[in-house]
Amino acid sequence: MTPDEHAELMRANQANWDARTPVHVASRFYGIDQDLDPARWFAPFEWEDLGGLTGRDVLHLQCHLGTETVAFARRGARTVGLDFSPASVEAARRIAARAGVEVTYVRANVYDAVRAVGEERFDVVYTGKGALCYLPDLDAWADVVARLLRPGGALYVVEFHPLLNALGPTPGPDEGPELLLRHDYLAGAGPVHRDARRTYTDGPAVEGATDSYEWMHGIGEVVTALTGAGLNVRTLRETDELPWPRWPHMEQAPSGWWRLPEPRVPLMYALLATR
């Protein structure tokens, strides 16, 4: 696809995330109307990998409602959140103010992030859990990340494992706990079009823009893009746990997160790379 075609699909995604935002704000999934607990979205190993954040400059790309962004600010970081959805950024500002933390939110497409933040550069760039699939060009993304980081700065990506995205329940009316490989693990011929009337949260259907486009990215593609941009991959973790139950038959682990019954398969990965 051409860059113009990619841009058109990303505009459709932006409209869909604008439409999702009020549904997500009101959902029990995010729990914004309750006591906000952004730390629940993080595994203990994430804080181990990131180290202390007090006094460091952190940029959270594709931050949506900023629930995770708030966690960085609470740990003492000077924090910036960036998202392409005006509705999400507006909601994120309200949520941060309500949480009593100082976060700067910027409305921009990831590919325009360098221009959007001006001269500011960061010690940590974070991308988390369900973000990369909305980016068509990982080489361009990696180049942006490299330009956003100070020398010695770190990118931390915590993402759903491509295997998770490839799994799905047995089709048909007798759907049971057995999962099959139903979707591509690696990138296919183009984006996957989804009807996003329902999202991953509880609540009513999305009204308005319901077209959503996703791109599959294998771990090899992510690593190759980052090394091609001059970053050094330091660690790569795989875990069989998720912060919420993707399927009904998942079991709660001692950590409080959720895993599938045996056999164990990776459901999420975490990659740390430095400039």
Image (spheres, rainbow, N blue to C red):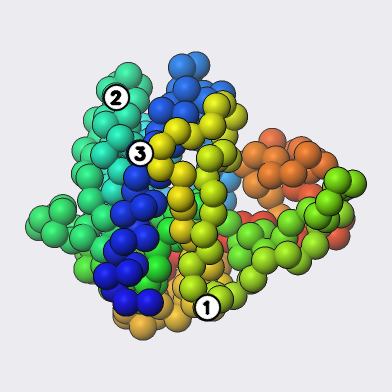
Name the residue carrying label 2. 94
* Mark 2 Cα-neighbour bin, 10 Å: few <14, some 14–19, many ≥20: some
Please state the horizontal and vertical placement of residue 49, each as a whole percent of the image: 48, 56
Left or right: where does residue 3 sit relative to residue 127?
left
Could one spot residue 232 in this view of the protein? no
Q: Residues within 10 Å of mark 1 (few under 14, many from 20)?
A: few
- Is 219 left or right of 210, judged from the image as shown? right
Q: CA distance from mark 2 to mark 3?
A: 15 Å
Can you identify the residue that label 1 sits on?
Answer: 189
Toward the viewer: 58 or 263? Answer: 263
Taking depth in this image into account, of 272 and 252 the one nearest to the observer is: 252
Residue 90 image point, x, y percent: 27, 31
163 is higher (above) or lower (below) than 74: below
Q: Which residue corresponds to mark 3?
A: 18
**Amino acid residing under circle 2:** Arg
Q: Amino acid at mark 3?
A: Asp
Asked if residue 23 shows in the view, the reply is yes
- Contact between marks 2 and 3 (CB within 8 A): the answer is no
Of circles 2 and 3, the one toward us is 3
